Amino acid sequence: MSSADGQTHPRVGAVLGETASIHGSAEKLDSSTVNRVLMEFLAYFGRAIFVLYPVYLTGYLGLSISWVLLIMLMATWWKKNRQTKVVRIGTAIDFVDNETQLVNKELGGALQMATWVHFPEVEKVDWVNKVLQQAWPFFGMYMEKLLKNNIQPAIRLSSPALKMFSFTKVHFGNTPLQITGMKVFTDEVDHRKVILDLDICYEGDVDIDAEVKPPITAGIKGLKFQGTMRVILEPLIGQVPLVGGVTFFFIRRPSLEINWTGMTNLLDSPAFSSLSENTIMDIIASLMVLPNRMCVPLIDQVKVDQMRFPLPRGVVRVHLLEARDLLAMDTYMLGLVKGKSDPYATLRVGNRHFKSKIVKENLHPKWNEVYEFVVHEAPGQELEVELWDDDTDKDDFLGSYHLDLGKVKKELEIDEWFTLEKVQNGEVRLKLQWFSLKSDPSLLRESEDGFACAMLAVYLDNASNLPKDQNEITEQQKHGKHAKEARLTKKRTTCPDSFVEFSIDKDVKKSKVIYASKDPVWEQGFTFFVHNVKTQQLTVQVKANEKKPALGVLNIPLSRLLDTSDMTLDQRFQLERSGVNSQIKLKATLRVLNLEKPPPKIIVKPPPQDKQQRPQTNQGSNVPVSAPSANASSSPALSPNAGPAGHSSPAPSLADNKDGFQTWRSTSSLSNMRRYDSHSLLSENSIASSRFDLSEGASYPEVIRQHQGSFGEIQLTVRYASLRNKLIVVVNSCRNIFRFGDNGTDSYVRLYFLPDQSWIHRKRTHVKKRTVNPFFDHKFEFDVSLEEAQNRKLDVSVKNGKMFHSRERKDIGMVMIELSQLDLVKGVTNWYELTLPGLKKHS
């Protein structure tokens, strides 16, 4: 490689020179760079000899070239076969790791999958689709009667230009509606009702023709419809038909695409298609999208108003704070130069919609705006956030995010960055707060920031004896009208088309129009945010036309509701400036917004250190016994000198068990132990069992301290998946756990993979209610090597799902499992006895 005079070989020098030029001419070559280049050259030279030597050997031995071709063919086949095996193994491992996501993806594209394939979240219901297919012709017959008997007269009355409107052909085709998935809620709801979420997809060959006015015709030939319908069976009763009523509605606005025919072909053009379909969706939303519902009472005892418009679940306050890393959509110089964007956000919950301000030329905008939404169903309703770039022609899409408001109801307060979907990058920061609805006037507090302090729910039922117009009201007020004139006036009087307009200050909402009726029935619900109960009032106006005077007026001061039972008025009201006997029936309910706060998190201090390492700041200070300082722990990673005033305390002894787990042994020295301090922010209920004060069980509830006998057992399955390099822990069930009431115990299992004891590493199951033998079947996975897993422990605790006093512990049984005592490769399923550390045994 080198000549005798120590100079580098010219060819190698050329290689080194090229490498140096790549890294920069100013960079000096060190010994590591030279060695790397030499190793690359030797490797290249070796591969060349390995490939070319068989060819040389074949020619030297005088063999046929066919041998070379055969060897090359076999090598190519072996390499391809090996690549295929690697791909299959990788696909299998990926399927095991992401089984639910992959199969759910296939379910979306292959609806004819076997009926036994299902997941707990969304189930396939092919049997329902078979029933729909059989009943579809009869559904078409029902829709034909509905359109001709109900819809056609309403359309004729809606406008003088549509007096001749008629359906000439109604055919709903041979393609039935499809239920692509069903999700059932039973554990999360009241025990007297069942909630079903149905994913509906309809792509049918509908053929409907109508004659507007000869010779003008219109029609629909095919449509696509998708949405999620919620069906509520409530209340469940102990007699036939077992269900008191059925309520169904769409949680969100469905999507609709229509193929128009006849004179309405114009509506298929891009300029009119979205307008026409949005108009139809507005009609559907006024009937079947929250807060509107379709109700079918099955027994007489069910109140229709409570079914059609139950009180909302709560109110969510959304703080639109900021966004970051948005896409730059504005370009200059024919797209050669990327600029910035002018972002704004739209927020929607149900039919309530807001648009934020526009931030000019900024990819990291800050809005700091606040919006309030009434939540009728949680889980189910979603907050839909979309970000757009404001342009003069068409706004550009910057991303979206959908958040189920059931998560806000569960966590009470969320302040997070959410990654935008359907775009390459971008995040939006939202802060969400949950407000419950209370009927206690003492909780009423007016906000200094201009936010709502209460919510008013109004259910509009019906009206009676409405006058036709103001002329009829004036005639009725005349005392000298002759009988003959009155009879002639009565003959000329027709029934009015009426709607109701509600308003609180500038917040105005309108009901649907009821045509040609003196006794209209609306059965609609409305909600309003209230900022000042003492000064604001609800104004009700019954109108026949926007530009004409009202047929009747009613004013209800909101302060009047504070003195009523349950803050509710439900009665018939006499209309002012109306007929003598004109009345309106409505129900108004006031509820106070109460901000729900999440459980407070305890900020604990770091453990005291040696006096030589850290100077003492408070000389002679005493730590009170009730202070929330952390306990000494049995974990080997924790310092044994964690007692108060720096004195050492003996660690609690652990007794080894034959089944490979350890139980706590109480000693006389435990009375001096206190909690171990930690840098992490832990709530009272998220600290591992080994961190708690063990002093005679003082932190346990009284019923726990007085309990005699066993605290039950827990069954766990622990195994190691060598192929995936994961430790799998399955919490199967518990038996004979501590009973807190006559109906049993609401319990869940908390698990730490020691020494990871922060809230980030906490694992927990769902709460199982009212049982002392809960069945969980919950699997947890940990990314860890087999050698490391065998040197760690599992800290398992069974906890009460209902909150005690803030200073009382929720533990009702614990066990510490030493993984080194288990055969993780084969897997172990055992029952472990639950104990409580520091609890005195009663004789």
Image (cartoon, rainbow, N blue to C red):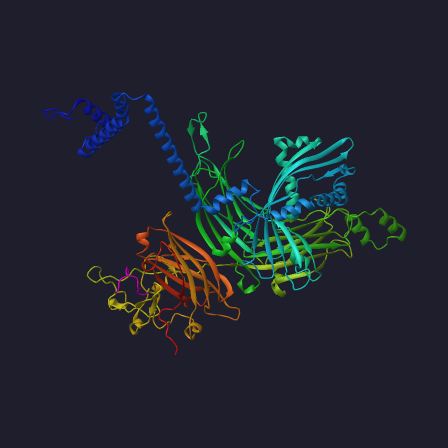
Quarter-of-image position of residue 651:
bottom left
The residue sitting at 10% across, 24% down in the picture is 4
Residue 639 is situated, as x and y percent measured from the top left of the image, at: 26, 62
Residue 751 position in % (x across, y down): 39, 59
> What is the count of numbered marks?
0
The residue located at (51%, 66%) in the rendering is: 771
Q: Position of residue 406 (x, y in %)?
A: 52, 53
Residue 757 drawn in magenta: no
Q: Quadrant of residue 11?
A: top left
Residue 474 or residue 817, whichever sits in front: 817
Viewer can see residue 50? yes
Front residue (pair 609, 366): 609
Query: Of residues 51 and 418, which is closer to you in this image?
Result: 51
Magenta-colored segment: predominant secondary structure: loop
Q: Could one spot residue 806 in this view of the protein?
A: no
Residue 157 screen position, x and y as percent: 76, 42
Magenta-drawn segment: 631-640
| Residue situated furthest left in the rendering | 5
With respect to residue 3, does 185 lie above or below? below
Vertical side of 645 occupied by 486: above or below: above
In screen coordinates, is 230 left or right of 140? left
Q: Residue at x 24, y 30 (%)?
A: 43
Q: Nearer the viewer, residue 260 or 739?
A: 739
Give the quarter of the figure containing the N terminus: top left
* Residue found 65% across the figure and 64% down from its top: 238
* Image quarter in which the C terminus is found: bottom left
635 part of magenta stretch: yes
